[in-house]
Amino acid sequence: MITVYIDGSSIGNPGKAGIGYLIYKDKKLVQEESVYLGVQSNNFAEYMGLIFSLADVVARGERKCLVYTDSKLVCEQINGNFKVKHQNILPLYTLAKKMISKIDEFTIKHILREKNKEADKLAKKATGFLT
C-alpha cells in the first residue's frame, strides 16, 4: 500500500503557486517532491498536488493508494460529495479521476493542516515562500 500526503499553496491566491507531496511505501519515505506552478489559484495547486502525485504512483505500478490532503474541497469533490462548480477546475478533476481509475484501490481522506506539515512545507518551498 502506498500512502501519499499532498498539498498545494498559492501565495496571494492567485499568486505564486507550488505543490508538495510525499510518497510512502510500507511507512518508508520513497519520494518527496516540491514543484513550482507559476501564478495560479490555491485550488489549482491543490489539484495539481493530487495529479502530480498520482502520476508517480501510477508510474510506479502501484495498485493500492491512500491519499491524505488538507484540502476539504479536493477530497469531497473526488469522493463525489461536492460538485465541481468552477470550469477551470473541471479539467483537473477529470484528469485526476482518470488517473485514479488506473489504481485498483484508491482512498482519499481529509486531514487537518497540522497533520500535513511536511507536504505544506514542500508546497511553500516551491513558491519561494520558504527557503
Image (spheres, rainbow, N blue to C red):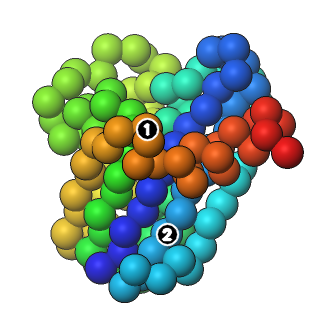
The vertical placement of 22 against 28, above or below, is above
Q: Is residue 38 left or right of residue 18?
A: right
Quadrant the C terminus occupies: top right
**Direction left: furthest residue:** 81
At 37% across and 85% down in the image, what residue appears? 26
The vertical placement of 3 against 128, above or below, is below
Q: Is residue 102 left or right of residue 19?
A: left
Q: Residues within 10 Å of mark 2 (few under 14, many from 20)?
A: many
Q: Is residue 47 left or right of residue 69?
A: right
Q: Position of residue 57 (x, y in %)?
A: 45, 71
Q: Earlier in the sequence, mark 2 or mark 1?
A: 2
Compare residues 28 and 82 and report the one nearer the observer. 28
At 27% across and 51% down in the image, what residue appears? 108
- Residue type beneath disc 1: Arg
Compare residues 38 and 122 and report the one nearer the observer. 122
Q: Position of residue 31 (x, y in %)?
A: 59, 73
Q: CA distance from mark 2 to mark 1?
A: 17 Å
The vertical placement of 6 against 66, above or below, is above
Q: Residues within 10 Å of mark 1 (few under 14, many from 20)?
A: some
Q: Position of residue 104 (x, y in %)?
A: 21, 72
- Residue type beneath disc 2: Ile
Q: Quadrant of residue 62?
A: bottom left
Q: Quadrant of residue 66?
A: bottom left
Q: Which mark is residue 113?
A: 1
At 79% across and 40% down in the image, what residue appears? 130
Compare residues 127 and 57 and report the one nearer the observer. 127
Q: Position of residue 114 (x, y in %)?
A: 44, 42
Q: Which residue is mark 2?
A: 23
Secondary structure under the numbered disc 2 in the rendered image: strand
